[in-house]
């Protein structure tokens, strides 16, 4: 854990990883374009203590694997194929992740996997924004239907995945495309049927924030 007490970026699952290069395909191009845009907006990046934050993923067409940013890549303004990994299997019982690629997978890989398991989502965006996070925690349950994982649930754990699954049992949560992690400071998940839809949901909820702020 860092001196700040933040354990962002720490992998909390059993990992079976094979190092190999990944091919560049159309899914990679779409995902990487989105990731690099998010970095330019400050929604993916690195804290002053050197801990990276934020990640993105996209599900394969056969829904058997997903491509995700590698761990601790947040500082890089632009990524390439050597900064991603392919998650081929997640065992939720043993909290084990099987992956292959040049880097180890993001510490939030299990949460991404649970979203894919419990919904028809094909892409997940995990950003950090103190302003959005604080605002959505206040707006939830008032004017807007914003799904919240309780503050007592730490990121990257079985408990986080289980809570996400419970939330996604409500179709309204999927259609809203947002989950705020109260116990994961600044952390927000957006998801959708495609990378474009996940990104559009992020943009929609950002517009909600600006309207609420300017009232």
Image (cartoon, helix red, strand yellow):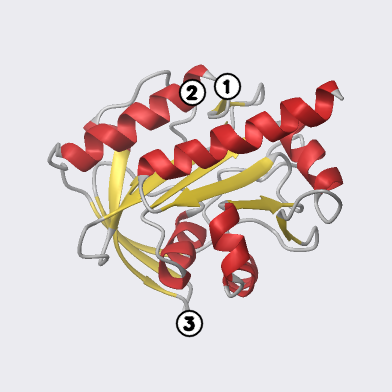
* Mark 1 vs mark 2, CA separation in Å: 5 Å
Mark 1 touches mark 2? (CB < 8 Å):
yes
Q: CA distance from mark 1 to mark 3?
A: 35 Å
Residue under numbered circle 3? 93
Image side of residue 138 versus residue 159, left or right? right
User: Where is residue 126 drawn, in percent x and y?
Assistant: 54, 43
Question: Does 58 appear above or below 84?
Answer: below
Mark 2 highlights which residue?
39
- What x and y, as percent, mark residue 103? 31, 42
- Nearer to us of marks 3 and 2 is 2
Q: Report if residue 145 is visible in the image.
A: yes
In the displayed structure image, the side of residue 2 where residue 138 appears, left or right: right
* Side of 201 where 120 appears, left or right: left
Residue in the picture at 73% in, 55% down: 145
Is label 1 in a helix, a strand or a loop?
loop
The image quadrant of residue 28 is: top left
What residue is shown with label 1? Answer: 42
């Amino acid at each position: 854990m860092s001196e700040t007490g933040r354990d962002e970026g720490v992998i909390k699952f059993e990992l079976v990883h094979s190092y190999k290069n990944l091919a560049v395909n159309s899914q990679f191009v779409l995902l990487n374009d989105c990731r690099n845009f998010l970095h330019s907006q400050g929604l993916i990046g690195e804290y002053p203590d050197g801990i990276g934050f934020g990640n993105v993923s996209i599900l394969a067409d056969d829904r058997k694997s997903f491509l995700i940013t590698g761990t601790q890549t947040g500082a890089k303004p632009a990524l390439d194929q050597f900064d991603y990994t392919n998650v081929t299997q997640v065992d939720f019982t043993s909290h084990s992740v099987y992956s292959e690629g040049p880097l180890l997978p993001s510490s939030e890989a299990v949460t991404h996997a649970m979203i894919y398991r419990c919904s028809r989502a094909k892409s997940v965006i995990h950003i950090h924004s103190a302003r959005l996070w604080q605002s959505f925690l206040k707006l939830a349950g008032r004017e807007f239907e914003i799904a919240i994982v309780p503050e007592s649930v730490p990121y990257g754990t079985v408990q986080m995945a289980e809570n996400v699954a419970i939330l996604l049992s409500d179709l309204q949560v999927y259609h809203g495309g947002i989950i705020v992690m109260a116990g994961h400071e600044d952390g927000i998940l957006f998801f959708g049927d495609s990378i474009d839809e996940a990104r559009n949901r992020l943009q929609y909820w950002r517009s909600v924030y600006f309207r609420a702020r300017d009232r």
